[in-house]
Image (cartoon, helix red, strand yellow):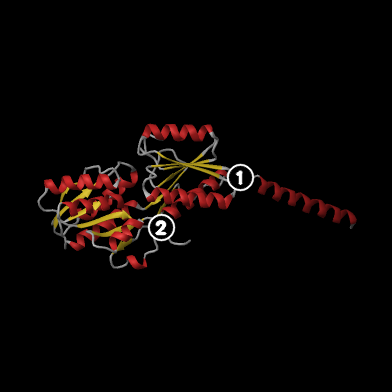
Amino acid sequence: MFKQKAVLASLALALGVTASAAHAADKQLKSVGITVGSLGNPYFVTIVKGAEAKAKQLNPNAKVTAVSADYDLNKQFTQIDNFISAHVDMILLNAADPKAIEPAVKKAQAAGIVVVAVDVAAAGANATVQTNNVQAGELSCDYIAKKLNGRGNVIIENGPQVSAVIDRVNGCKSVFAKAPGIKVLSDDQDAKGSREGGMNTMQGYLTRFPKVDAVFAINDPQAIGSDLAAKQLQRKNIVITSVDGAPDIETALKSDTLVQASASQDPWAMAQTAVGIGYGIMNGKNPASQVTLLPSTLVTRDNVTSYKGWSSPR
């Protein structure tokens, strides 16, 4: 009996040690490097804040370093090299070029760093977390098609050729293709993803085209800039839609602007999900799918008051 108890005690002790060792084996998240398109865009600022909150939840002492690539591939290569030198555990990557960034991704992984693509795809990344951007483009342009009753002159105001933008434009084009009465006047101008770019590009459109019924801008800053240009040139009766659901667009939807709708993204949830998935990969737990798509919803003048935006409490 004594022997049996001793064996059981030894077994329990061994199991306890094994469980404790397994738990201790989990790698701690000590540092995260984040490189995004532009920290001048509130969207990317929210991504950084969401990632930092999740990292601190996993380890209150985790260090988070965020930098702005300004859509410059060479700059992003250097930033990733700096993250490798700093021995970060994880990189959240908003790729300036989804294909050309691959050598930098591979270099980071060779150094034992997990790379999670956020907002746009990045070749070779361990995982990708992004909005369903095709759906976002569809929602935004379906609103235009319905508003125009399927007839009119429209512009697709393009942007930097990252996967998110390409997907939005493809989603938009698929909707317009189903409405033969809609004529796309332009779809290839890069308005740089910025307010200034949207304003300059829109000025060009309105100078060139005497009749423009609607504009789909690939993000909210471009939409705000486009609205400013239309005001300056005293052009009215233009429906402007976009993608993001940013704080600025909430204001625009509640005031006297041409902006009518924006397909929302949730950059906070995107960043939190990305860090969570990256932490799992660090500890040998791969996600069920390599790509995680977050759904988009359409924010309009009718529902903006009930919209829980980027800055809502979580």
Give the structural element (helix, strand or loop) at label 1: loop
Query: Callout 1: few (<14), some (14-19), or many (20+) C-alpha neighbours within 10 Å?
Result: some
**Residue at 11% across, 48% down:** 209
Closer to the camera in the image, 55 or 229: 229
Whether residue 58 sits left or right of residue 93 in the image: it is right
Mark identifier at residue 145: none
Q: Residue furthest right?
A: 2
**Residue where numbered disc 1 is placed:** 28
Mark identifier at residue 310: 2
Closer to the camera in the image, 81 or 40: 40
- Which amino acid type is shown beneath numbered disc 1? Gln
* Quadrant holding the N terminus: bottom right
**Residue at 37% across, 43% down:** 38
Q: Quadrant of residue 296?
A: bottom left
Determine whether 300 is above or below 153 in the image: below
**Residue at 27% across, 53% down:** 224
